[in-house]
Image (cartoon, rainbow, N blue to C red):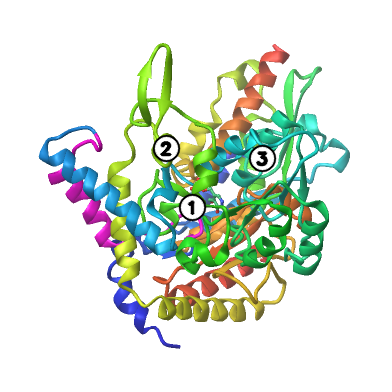
């Protein structure tokens, strides 16, 4: 799933129901995380819903592999957007990304209440923390 | 359905003229905080505009006027609850009141004494007691609640007689489910054991207007903002001998008799629990809320709330896959539910796109959610300013949301 495609499909909808429909479709397309990987260590704190995140490096290609899941449809869709942003990036490049800014650009952040917005922020912060460990 | 009392009353609440995200507000979150009538907003504004002065601290005219107005509200509330003025303490809210009481009663608790709570309690009526138990070695026991979230009265009475708790602290109405507990019966059962009874009235003050002499509780706590008043204010009632015997909780000016470095003496209750400059504007605003309520026909408002509640229940039950929690036969007008396995977060987020304000999550009652075996619910809570249109809009939005989720 590439970002310009996501941006385009979200922009099509003026009403929020339509945007959320797109977001939930993105979530549906995201493969479910096997239960064995839904460990306490993988839980992202600071989200209203449950979010699990794993970040790894494909040593050979030096590219990031992220997998994530959530128990809610909407957050799972938001995760799909974040993953589209970070997956397959070089760690150094990924370190410079700011998914929060991306959400702002997609017009999503201002419509997420602080607690929901903080969920996105918490996920992004977790990614960047783990990136630092990689480097 | 008769919407009459509501059509006039709704005009008293300016928030309903505001649009939220370009839609008229459909406010079904009164259990979190109620909306404020013009009279309350005006009273707070008038106070700052033309009466502002500190209380109990000056001989000048404004200070005397402010003090008189401030103390008059204490009398008004005492009358409303059918107790004495000196038994009312102002605090910052129900949370602060429960902390004050739990801290104060710690002095009379010892190892293995029983503090009796219920699984229905708000965290504010759990955590202060856990701290008290930790300080004193007392232990916390729970009243029985069934799988639907209903207190089992007969078993509860037997348990009280059996455990002889030192303290029992129970909500009058559950914030998460709306259940009205028969607290009068629980209090009566505890009399022979000399239990100190504390009633969390955060959800009952507005809907039930309790007569505390009839309830016969020792303490009752509330938040003004859940009963049409301003935020940042609440209070407690305490049976005078018990209240006055509690140790000082926070200290400072205004609550002392004399201060010297060889020793300080405190004023009697309620002053000894009200250090520092109080929330004067809040109290004045709450006075206007009490006047407002006194001018309404309580029975008519209650009937109106109950008929809206019945209509909401009925329409919700008509939707396949809705699971409603709590006691629907005794309720202040709060519906807590889940839809199939859908997450409350998704439901609430999508409902919000229709301008529907409901609460979602654990409602500060995590032990209750664990007891019910769920993570959280959607909670729609009513007040007398709601109308049938709010219910229809909510139901239409919910159906729309469900079909979006099931696409
Ligand atoms: C039953 C109950 N108890 C206590 C509280 C705490 O009230 P406050 O947050 O106003 O102090 C609440 C508020 O939600 C409540 O519903």
Task: Give how far across and how far down residue B54 sits, in percent.
Answer: 23, 35
Q: Which residue is mark 2?
A: B268
Residue B82 in view in this figure: yes
Q: Is residue A24 above or below residue B307?
A: above
The residue carrying pointer 2 sits among few (fewer than 14), some (14 to 19) or many (20 or more) residues within 10 Å by Cα, namely: some
Q: Which numbered mark, 2 or 1, is in the foreground of this view?
A: 2
The boundaries of the magenta stretch are B29-56
Task: Give how far across and how far down residue B215 sits, in percent.
Answer: 57, 64
Q: Which residue is mark 3?
A: B129
Q: Which residue is mark 1?
A: B222
Q: Is residue B333 above or below residue B124?
A: below
Q: Residues under labels 1 and 3: Cα distance? A: 17 Å
Q: Residue at x 65, y 77 (%)?
A: B329
Q: Residues under labels 2 and 1: Cα distance? A: 22 Å
N-term mark: 1 or 3: 3
Q: Residue at x 69, y 63 (%)?
A: B186
Q: Residue at x 78, y 33 (%)?
A: B111
Q: Is residue B65 magenta?
A: no
Local SS, label 3: helix
Q: Chain of mark 1?
A: B
């Amino acid at each position: 799933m590439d970002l310009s495609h996501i941006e385009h499909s979200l922009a099509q909808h003026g009403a929020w129901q339509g945007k959320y429909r797109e977001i939930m479709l993105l979530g549906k397309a995201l493969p479910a995380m096997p239960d064995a990987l839904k460990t306490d260590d993988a839980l992202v704190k600071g989200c209203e819903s449950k979010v699990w995140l794993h970040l790894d490096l494909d040593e050979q290609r030096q590219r990031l592999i992220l997998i994530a899941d959530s128990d809610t449809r909407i957050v799972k869709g938001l995760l799909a957007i974040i993953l589209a942003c970070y997956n397959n990036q070089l760690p150094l490049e990924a370190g410079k990304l700011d998914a929060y800014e991306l959400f702002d650009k997609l017009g999503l952040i201002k419509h997420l209440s602080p607690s929901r917005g903080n969920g996105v922020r918490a996920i992004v912060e977790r990614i960047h923390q783990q990136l630092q460990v990689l480097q | 359905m008769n919407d009459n009392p509501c059509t006039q009353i709704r005009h008293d609440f300016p928030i309903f003229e505001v649009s939220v995200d370009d839609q008229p507000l459909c406010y079904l979150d009164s259990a979190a905080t109620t909306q404020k009538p013009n009279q309350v907003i005006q009273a707070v504004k008038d106070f700052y505009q033309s009466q502002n002065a500190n209380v109990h601290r000056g001989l000048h005219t404004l200070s005397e006027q402010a003090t008189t107005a401030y103390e008059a509200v204490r009398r008004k509330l005492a009358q409303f609850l059918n107790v004495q003025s000196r038994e009312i303490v102002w605090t910052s809210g129900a949370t602060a009141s429960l902390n004050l009481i739990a801290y104060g009663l710690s002095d009379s608790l010892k190892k293995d004494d029983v503090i009796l709570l219920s699984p229905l309690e708000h965290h504010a009526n759990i955590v202060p007691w856990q701290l008290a138990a930790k300080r004193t070695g007392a232990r916390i026991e729970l009243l029985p609640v069934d799988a639907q979230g209903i207190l089992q009265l007969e078993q509860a009475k037997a348990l009280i007689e059996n455990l002889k708790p030192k303290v029992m602290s129970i909500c009058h109405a559950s914030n998460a489910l709306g259940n009205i507990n028969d607290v009068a019966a629980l209090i009566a059962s505890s009399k022979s054991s000399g239990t100190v009874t504390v009633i969390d009235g955060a959800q009952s003050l507005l809907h039930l207007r309790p007569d505390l002499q009839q309830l016969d509780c020792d303490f009752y706590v509330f938040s003004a903002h859940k009963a049409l008043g301003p935020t940042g204010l609440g209070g407690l009632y305490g049976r005078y001998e018990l209240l006055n015997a509690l140790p000082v909780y926070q200290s400072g000016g205004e609550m002392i008799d004399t201060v010297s470095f060889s020793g300080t003496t405190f004023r009697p209750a309620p002053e000894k629990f009200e250090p520092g400059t109080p929330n004067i504007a809040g109290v004045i605003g709450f006075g206007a809320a009490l006047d407002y309520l006194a001018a309404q026909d309580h029975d008519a408002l209650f009937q109106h709330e109950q008929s809206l509640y019945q209509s909401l229940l009925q329409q919700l039950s008509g939707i396949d896959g809705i699971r409603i929690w709590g006691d629907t036969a005794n309720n202040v007008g709060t519906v807590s539910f889940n839809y199939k396995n859908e997450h409350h977060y998704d439901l609430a987020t999508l409902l919000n796109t229709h301008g529907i304000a409901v609460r979602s999550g654990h409602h500060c009652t995590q032990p209750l959610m664990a007891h019910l075996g769920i993570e959280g619910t959607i909670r729609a809570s009513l007040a007398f300013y709601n109308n049938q249109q709010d219910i229809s809009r909510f139901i239409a939005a919910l159906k729309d949301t469900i079909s979006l989720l099931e696409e």
